[in-house]
Image (tube, rainbow, N blue to C red):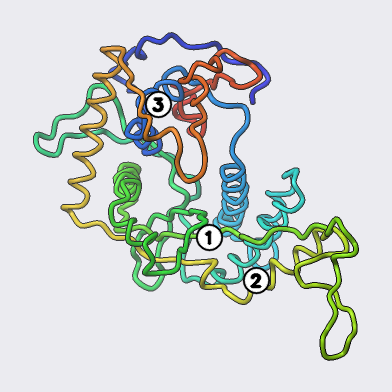
Amino acid sequence: MSAAPCALPSALPPERSRVHLPLLTTSEVRSFLRCRRAHHYRYRLRVRPIETSAALRFGTLIHAGLEAMWRAWLEGFGGDDVLSASLDAVQAEADAFDRVKAEELLRGYYLRWRDADLEVLGVEVEFRSAITNPATGARSRTYDLGGKIDAIVRELATGRVLIVEHKTTSEDATIGSAYWRRLRLDPQVSNYLVGARAIGHEATSCLYDVLAKVSLRPYKETPDPEKRFVTDKVTKLQRLDARQHDHDETPEEFRARVRASIAEDSEGYFSRGEVVRSEEDEQDAAFDVWNVAREVRDAERGMRFPRNPAACSSFGSTCEYFDVCSRTAALDDPTRFRVACAAHEELSAARAD
């Protein structure tokens, strides 16, 4: 949250510039398709919840560590210096157990992929590209396509240039799982290939990097001491019930369990595969972006932003604007919401527009 709060923007669509059009990102497209009302709140009024979900916080933590690791590789660091740079990037996290999980995932990721035959060409690379109608070649006069690519690399064995995308997930992400099959339709890969080429990198495909989240939780002391022990029928001796614990697990005790779990199932925690796009795939994705851009423009012109009740709850979480839509909270409540200074805070190009 910035020191100087930003003013609530006008509800009117932003003024279009012939030099710099507003950016439309893959995340924004997904938001619009999920619920137009939530999209309006988030990207046009720029209202964001002050509190973010635990899943988002952890994903951000891992992303910070991976960015530091890949920047160290880009700058020519080697060995323990790369891992140290990555671990240093997560030291500010308040929750000790989340920090342990993040550190051990980053350590395992480093050990698994440190010998990959890749030259890092860029990290957190921003792009701006035209949104074009594939049927006519006409350029959108409303939006440009924007985004930030996690990394761009050259495969040393072949000389091919690839974009790299990092993701964390709670799903089964082993190669061949439903997670990987869905990537066949993921628009982000197509959009980022277009973006890489727009800034001079002739990328041919995407190296997709998935880290499975640690499902382990720290042990808590069993409240009733009398229930902690069971009697072995053979020896008649009492032993600690495996399901019970005589003290709260410390972060370092938890770290040992997490590290052992990752070591036992490295392939389950870290999967990496190439996601390719045919010319037809990229054309389909271009049509998708073009059509969504037109729908966003039409919604803004008509000032109509329908709610989608089917999107109010998904994957066990409730939409961050549910209370606003159900009229039990207000967007201008400073204890619940803040106003972002740009629709795409993660992009310096968008902040400068």
Q: CA distance from mark 2 to mark 3?
A: 39 Å
Write the residue at 36% across / 69% down: 176
- Of residues 212 and 222, the one nearer the viewer is 222
Q: CA distance from mark 1 to mark 2?
A: 14 Å
Residue 81 position in % (x across, y down): 69, 62
Write the residue at 52% across / 66% down: 270
Quadrant assignment for the N terminus: top right
Query: Which amino acid type corresponds to the residue marked 2 in the rendered image?
Result: Ser
- Of residues 143 and 176, the one nearer the viewer is 176
**In this rendering, position of residue 72 left or right of residue 210:** right
Mark 3 = which residue? 39
Query: Which amino acid type corresponds to the residue marked 3 in the rendered image?
Result: His
Residue 80 location, quadrant: bottom right
Q: Earlier in the sequence, mark 2 or mark 3?
A: 3
The answer to whether the residues at label 1 and label 2 have Cβ atoms under 8 Å apart is no
Where disc 2 sits, the SS reads helix
Residue 108 position in % (x across, y down): 62, 67
Residue 118 position in % (x across, y down): 46, 66
Q: Earlier in the sequence, mark 1 or mark 3?
A: 3
Mark 2 = which residue? 261
**In this rendering, position of residue 169 left or right of residue 256:** left
Where disc 1 sits, the SS reads strand
Q: CA distance from mark 1 to mark 3?
A: 28 Å
Label 1 packing within 10 angstroms: few (<14), some (14-19), many (20+): many
Label 3 packing within 10 angstroms: few (<14), some (14-19), many (20+): many
Query: Which amino acid type corresponds to the residue marked 1 in the rendered image?
Result: Leu
Residue 21 position in % (x across, y down): 32, 23
The vertical placement of 74 against 310, above or below, is below
View extreme (left): residue = 136
Mark 1 = which residue? 211
Residue 340 location, quadrant: top right
